[in-house]
Image (cartoon, rainbow, N blue to C red):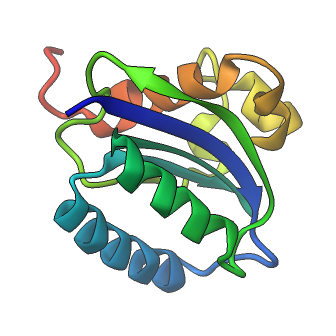
Amino acid sequence: MALYEIIYVSVAPGDMAAAELSSLMDKAREHNARRGITGMLLYHNREFMQLLEGEEAEVKALYDAICDDDRHQQVYKMWEGPIAERNFSSWSMGFLAPDDAMLRGRPGYEPLLEQGLMASSRDSTGKKMLLRVRDDFLCTDRPA
């Protein structure tokens, strides 16, 4: 099976409450686990950035469904292409919705705080940020 990834950014039509985000993630994790899709979703100030990885047809089908989902507006695909290995193999979908206080003072998050996730789509900052979030906030099995 050839692995494939898509990274996109989008804007929610309004603020999403914690319960709404939690419900979205529960459904996404169940759906993704059945289809062999892994990845990471970052939500900050009404903006989403997501990396999807898995078999090419499954990843593309999920991305198309996201483009048709009313919870995602101004969808912009930052990158797509084949990958040698998964970056998020442990998660059907890693998730973080940080507030500004959580990010302030941490190296590397200035672009997110100053410009937002949509601005990250202009260069390779997006994937770097998702990998940094994974390592800084979600990986609990790293050595101290």
In the image, taking residue 17 as reference, residue 56 lies left or right, namely left
Image quarter for residue 12? Answer: bottom right
Q: Position of residue 57 (x, y in %)?
A: 39, 50
Front residue of 105 and 30: 30
Q: Position of residue 36 (x, y in %)?
A: 21, 53
Q: Is residue 139 visible?
A: yes
Q: Would you place residue 90 above or below residue 126 in this image? A: below
Q: Is residue 45 visible?
A: no
Write the residue at 65% across / 77% down: 69
Front residue of 112 and 37: 37
In the image, taking residue 34 as reference, residue 40 lies left or right, namely right
Write the residue at 17% across / 40% down: 90
Front residue of 94 and 92: 92
Q: Would you place residue 26 above or below residue 36 in this image? A: below
Q: Position of residue 66 (x, y in %)?
A: 60, 67
Q: Would you place residue 48 above or below residue 135 in this image? A: below
Write the residue at 40% across / 33% down: 4
Quadrant containing the N terminus is: top left
Write the residue at 65% across / 44% down: 8
Q: Position of residue 134 (x, y in %)?
A: 38, 32
Quadrant containing the C terminus is: top left
Q: Number of marks in the image?
A: 0
Front residue of 7 and 43: 7
